[in-house]
Image: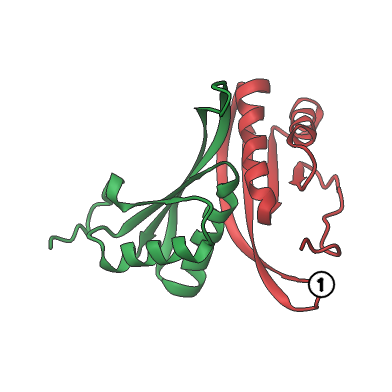
Chain colours: A red, B green
Amino acid sequence: MPTKNTKKPKQKVDNTVFVGSKPVMTYVLAVVTQINNGPYNQVTIKARGRAISRAVDTAEIVRNKFVKNLIISEIKIGTESVKNEKGLDSNVSTIEICLLKKN
Amino acid sequence: MPTKNTKKPKQKVDNTVFVGSKPVMTYVLAVVTQINNGPYNQVTIKARGRAISRAVDTAEIVRNKFVKNLIISEIKIGTESVKNEKGLDSNVSTIEICLLKKN
């Protein structure tokens, strides 16, 4: 059962794209837009739980299909503690993929 | 049994755990067994597609609950081309997480 209260708001905090349960091309578009139009030459893709595989898909599609001069500067994994619908703590894995634009 | 403490051994086929669709504790057990009983001080966890998030779960559970002196030495992501059931090529994302035992 997916937890309803932990849904990530779609926030535009500088150069970070949070990947959730929408189709992967939504996030690909967000990353490409950030890289091409944003003030930074680096974008961080973050996800947790089952969205982790979609975050990897996003990074790979952006690199292979849309922005060729990107390198993966860093990949971090971790664990976050979240409250589930019963109010109990449960651990969820996280990933952060940093994409850096080569000049 | 010779120990290679001075040099990091390159990954071999036999210290790799492939994560698929079984419960995550299956893979956690496989990794812990490899690290504690295998000849290598390094284990690589590989997965592709939707199993990627389970691979991250595996690495995090091993590190946080079972083998405390592990570091993540490398995380790689990539894309593989596979034939689907219709015989068409389709791309799938992959992940490799290298866990290294500190002495």
Name the quadrant of the C terminus of chain B: bottom left
Q: Judge left or right: residue A8 versus residue B94.
A: right
Which residue does the numbered mark 1 point to in the structure image? A85
Across and down, in percent, residue B43 comes to 36, 55
Across and down, in percent, residue A41 comes to 69, 32
Residue placed farthest to the front in the image?
Answer: B86
Q: Judge left or right: residue B33 versus residue B91.
A: left
Q: Is residue B58 above or below residue A60?
A: below
Residue A2 sits in which quadrant?
bottom right
Name the quadrant of the N terminus of chain B: bottom left
Q: Judge left or right: residue B103 versus residue A63.
A: left
Determine crowd level at label 1: few under 14, some 14-19, many 20+ residues with C-alpha closer than 10 A: few
Q: Nearer the viewer, residue B48 or A34?
A: B48
Q: Residue at x 29, y 45 (%)?
A: B13
Q: Is residue B103 visible?
A: no
Q: Residue at x 80, y 29 (%)?
A: A33
Q: Is residue B13 visible?
A: yes
The chain containing the residue under callout 1 comes to: A
The residue type indicated by label 1 comes to Glu
Q: Nearer the viewer, residue A100 or B99?
A: B99
